[in-house]
Image (cartoon, rainbow, N blue to C red):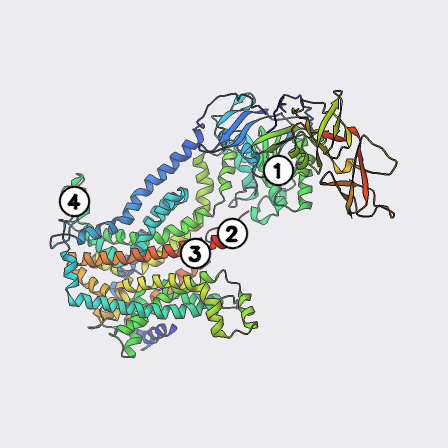
Amino acid sequence: MGVPFFFILRLSLSDGLEHYRDVLASPVLGRVVENTLVISAATTLVTLVLAYIYAAALWRAGPLLRSLLFGLVLLPFWTGVLVKNFAWAALLQDNGAVNDLLRGLGLVEGRLSLLHNRLAVIIGMVHYVLPYAVFPIYAAMIAIDRQLERAARSLGAPIRKVIWHVTIPLSLPGVYAAALLVFIISTGFFITPIILGSPGDMMMANMVDFYAHQIVDFDGAAALSVLVILVVSVLVFVYQRLPKEGQYGSV
Amino acid sequence: MAASEPSILVQGAPLPHVGRRERAGRLLLLVAALPIAIYLLLPTLVVVPMALTKGQMIQFPPEWISIHAFTDYFSDPQWIDSTITSFKVAVLATTIACIVGLLAAIGLHGKAFPGRSAVVGVILAPIVVPLVVLALADYLFFAKLQLAGDWVAIGFAHSLLVTPYVFITVQSSLVGLNPSLILAARSLGARPLSVLRHVYWPVTKPGILAGAIFAFAVSFDEVVIALFLQGPDATTLPVRMFTSIQYDLTPKIAAIASLLLGLAAIALAAQGALAFRGYARRRLSAT
Amino acid sequence: MDSVTTAADPNQVPRVTAISADRPAGRRVEVSGVWKAYDNGPYVLEDVSFTLEPGEFLTLLGPSGSGKTTTLMMVAGFEQPTRGEIRVGGRNVARLPAEQRNFGIVFQGYALFPHMTVLENVEFPLRMRGLARREGRRRSMDMLEKVGLEQFFKRRPRELSGGQQQRVALARALVFEPDALLLDEPLGSLDKRLRETLQLEIKAIQRRVGISILFVTHDQDEAMMMSDNIAVMWNGRIVQLGSPIEIYQHPRTPFVASFLGETNLLAATECGTDGKVTQVRFADGSLGLVREPNRGGRVRTAEGDVVLSLRPERIRLLGPCDSADGVISGILVERTFLGRQTRYVVEALGQKLIVSTSEPPLPNELSLGKPVRLGWARGDAQLLAMIHD
């Protein structure tokens, strides 16, 4: 399994570090890195908010509703990224459903350009990663001892203070894990920026493809890949060190 | 014993005070989660109707109703070819993944040694590495072997990608297996193959099945690796769709997307049935 | 089903409320006629009534499912009675949510906030009440000192032992001077020695602070050791309420008799009484005298059936010339020496009766299989108020 990686490494190091310098000197790189970071960060933020709400609803729901909500979040999990992107493209296009809806509701006059821009990319990406975020947050929530809520109330805390002082702090480990996971996944996106974004929304993965197929500079592509792997590895390492649910230990 | 008359403040219905507040909170959460659920569901909901449009263009809501998009797809030899290719690739990938994943999970089962987490890390690595990096590496590798552009290459590359999933599911099905059972079997004279057949196989069957379903689905839908390794005879369905989408959104693509959705739904249902059966069986054996 | 003539409500009986607290604090808690059913299901509590006086240690004792924890939760405000009232200091608290009832609760498992330090845990109720930070800190440290944990104030709950966590839970529940302390089987998960130590500690704290305690447990030794009064619960009802001595020596029902300590239950028929002492006849024809319970009416059936409760330690093995108020003949089937007691199992009246004595068995003791005579004094046998629960 390590063989293909070896190949990349070897190829990237042929002719020494020159390829790395070339890649790093590329004017496009700065822009692409910025895109990747901004889009991934935005995706992560939006996803966390939505995922927290959904996980909380999942947590508090009765058994029937919980199964339903679970199913709803699992189905997108199983559909391929292509189907999802296609659907979003169809929905967000100028004569697509979303535009029609907005016009029908009287919220906009003309046609909003919702496709082939950063907004569309983020919409598509959040949709993809949302299930990945819901699960760790949900896991952290159900690990919270239910007696704690009663204890807090018995000590005089009204519901909103119980949420602030008990529920949220104890669910944070799940949030951190979800955030990192989503961020890691976001940085690797390939299909979504192409279908839903503009050329100016190019992300890291697209750049590797660019080097490989457009410029046909495989060495450079290899060098870039190695850099990407390095960054991702660091992130994964941090993720492994994160305490997840049950961090505080049960008492 | 005659019951004393209760001093009645509230008769019958329970006092609603606390219950009402908690229920209100729950309702609020549900209301907030509803749009999110719709957001999650939206693409799924619109794909099928879009495929059933009479027109030649994608629109939602569509002009009902015709299955011309589906017939267009089935009568197009190129698309059918791609479908078959995807199928061949997925079967190959799943088969390899099941074997390797099973052996890896069994091999690591119950054994603790320094560096174990490193080994597990390597096995699980393909999940976290950005697909494009994997794709590039695979391309370079198979190009060297003169196999780039052959569907077999894609199959092998996919197996690399999906083996971790089988590993995970098999591993979790092995959790309940006491390692000393293996030792017991061996002390009774069972050779490795018999141990495999009589001890491991019954326990891991559901795990393998679950992993296989997921592996198949992932491989069938996969785009990036297939893109890098594509050849004139080895264009998978998703790759063809991808190229097509970049140019034009046609109902035919919606039709294919609907079919893929159906595949996903079946896979999800199969997983659910597996999980349910496992749950039911465990409850039975616990009584 | 027996025809029943009189009913004795345990709560109409004047109770000797022995309160061990020096200076009683807190407010009186009255539970009156409380019934509870979940969602049109069967009643899990039926007509539960009792009073917790300031400074009193009252235990709800019963097996699992008897409704004792549900009752506690209703006093606490986490459950609502379907019927009936709960009053604190004369005020009806039905509409009051749990966070506004001023009770300190120690839950099973303690429910200490794992993400806060010991000090922050204890401070929490004071913060919720809007107390200034510094004052809250001072009072919390005082409280921690009282329970002997002041040097652990910076630790997290998971770093403490079970006994220490228990004390933090107590400190947290006491720091805001609640109207009463509610404890839900707090010692269940601890080992025997630790449990006994903590029982004494809780009792000592209660005496010192003077607070009323409502204690829930299924362990009758614990209940007898700690309580001023015990309410024995079964199937959602309070079957008897009284001091430990009273309940032990004068159980009203077979359930109470066998739940607290051991007892032998014997069926017999009344055959004469002078109001103070009754003569009963057993199935094999032997007769015995029993003192009538001096409190509350006893259920009298038309046929005159009664149930006697005889504690093992109150029965003697009679010598050939001994006599007693009541004598039963049987066969000795088992003898066990347990160090602090010797137990004999005697088959008589179709049952296995247990006799225990603190005397070691004599060398020329009766051998197994030989007939023996058992005797008791009229004041040592109990006529149970009810023959069925």
> Do the residues at discs 2 and 1 belong to one chain?
no
Cα distance between the residues tagged 1 and 4: 66 Å
**Residue with the mark numbered 4:** A100
Identify whether C238 is placed above or below A23: above
Tag 3: residue type?
A: Gly
Tag 1: residue type?
A: Thr
> Is residue A225 or residue B254 the one in the foreground?
B254
Percent x, y for residue B235? 22, 69
For mark 3, name the chain.
B
User: Mark 4, residues whose alpha carbon is within 10 Å: few (<14), some, or many (≥20)?
Assistant: many
**Is residue A226 among what the camera can see?**
no
**Residue with the mark numbered 3:** B278
Whether tag 3 and tag 1 are in contact, CB under 8 A, the answer is: no
> Do the residues at discs 4 and 3 belong to one chain?
no
Q: Residue furthest left?
A: B55
**Residue with the mark numbered 2:** B287
Describe the element under mark 4 as helix, strand or loop. Answer: helix
Q: Residue furthest front?
A: C285
State which mark lies toward you, 4 or 2.
2
State which mark lies toward you, 3 or 1.
3
Tag 4: residue type?
A: Asp
> Is residue C149 or residue C247 the one in the foreground?
C247
Quarter of the image with the N terminus of chain B in it:
top right
**Residue with the mark numbered 1:** C217
Cα distance between the residues tagged 4 and 3: 46 Å
Cα distance between the residues tagged 3 and 1: 38 Å
In the figure, is residue A234 to the left or right of C335? left
User: Mark 1, residues whose alpha carbon is within 10 Å: few (<14), some, or many (≥20)?
Assistant: many
Cα distance between the residues tagged 2 and 3: 15 Å
Residue located 45% across and 28% down the image = B14
Percent x, y for residue C335? 78, 47
